[in-house]
Image (cartoon, helix red, strand yellow):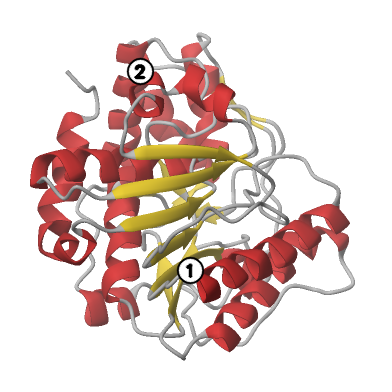
Amino acid sequence: MNPLASDLDHVLAHTQGLWEELRGQRIFITGGTGFFGCWLLESFAWTNDKLGLKASAVVLTRNPKSFAAKMPHLAGRSDLIFIAGDVRDFSFPSGTFPYVIHAGTTSSAPVEPREMFGTIVDGTRRVLEFAATHGTRKLLFVSSGAVYGRQPSGVTHVPENYAGAPDPTDPGSAYGEGKRAAELLCSLAAGKGLETKIARCFAFVGPHLPLNAHFAVGNFLRDGLAGGPIQVLGDGTPVRSYLYSAELAVWLWTILFQGANARAYNVGSETCLTIAETAHAVADSFSPQLPVRIQTPAGSGPALRYVPCTRRAREELGLTQEIEPCRAIEKTLRWLQNTHATHA
């Protein structure tokens, strides 16, 4: 039995009316072997089987063999075709692809800023060239809340029309500025039969989340699986919110199929947790409860925030969060324990 069966049933139950247009069609996915990609492929394969869609996906990845070792139950499927290549210059697969999801270029790997920026922008340009020449009708670009730059302390939940931006003089802005430029390319490409939709993704937790990247909740789960304590490297005051990975899949598929053309949607949770509260939520999920160690005392300045306003997604697309963050953390831990995974 698939250990994600209940989660994948959740995805299907919340997207079932959307899939008919994909029946017998092909979809092209970049970044299909990362955290987001794993959930897109898991949910695609599950739905393809349950609804008998007879759809197929071609998935661009740098290393198909590595993915096959990590996810053999997906790598061996006939409806998933994996091709090796770099998103910046990949060879176009032949045929028509009415749907494209560009989820490449993760922020989880340590990459030199110029390479990061170039990969995001040049990769998006290449994907748009592919879409323009392969009959694509709907394209989803997976962007990031990093496009807003530093969230002011007075803005509790940042909306899509917030006019802030990353600091262009800071090399650390390469990821956010790259995503901003890529969003512009998508908006310029919209029209002439192609609809482009943008998902500005914030923070998430769930199976397949990397435990050794810069995602705090993943690091805390790693610490706990190693026996603890849970280590908070800073003062624990930054504020985050976490959407569960199964709901992430619901939101991404819904935006692809139903999102408005050239429109951006925040994707994430509005339920706020400080990093310290997140660490304690992870610690509380273990039995016995684990200790939490916070490295530095809390400062006197306002806490850094990274929390979206999701009103647009709720009101225009009917998207909601049903799995609260603490429950999402518990579900992730149980999956890790049941699958004996130590990293994703």
Which residue has dot 1 on it? 134
Residue at left 21%, top 23%?
A: 2
Dot 1 falls on a residue whose secondary structure is loop
Residue at left 65%, top 49%?
A: 107
Residue type for callout 2:
Phe
Residue at left 58%, top 71%?
A: 128
**Foreground residue, 306 or 284?**
306
Q: Is residue 333 left or right of residue 177?
A: left
**Foreground residue, 196 or 27?**
27
Residue 52: % across, % down: 11, 45
Residue 316: % across, % down: 25, 82
Indicate the quadrant where residue 260 lies: bottom left
Asked if residue 36 can be seen in this view, the reply is no
Q: In the figure, 344 relative to 297: above or below?
A: above
Indicate the quadrant where residue 185 lies: bottom right
Which residue has dot 2 on it? 286
Q: In the figure, 84 relative to 55: above or below?
A: above
Q: Is residue 105 left or right of residue 7?
A: right
Tell me how far mark 1 sits from mark 2, CA to CA. 49 Å
Dot 2 falls on a residue whose secondary structure is loop
Residue type for callout 1:
His
Where is the N terminus found, in terms of image quarters?
top left
Residue 34: % across, % down: 52, 39
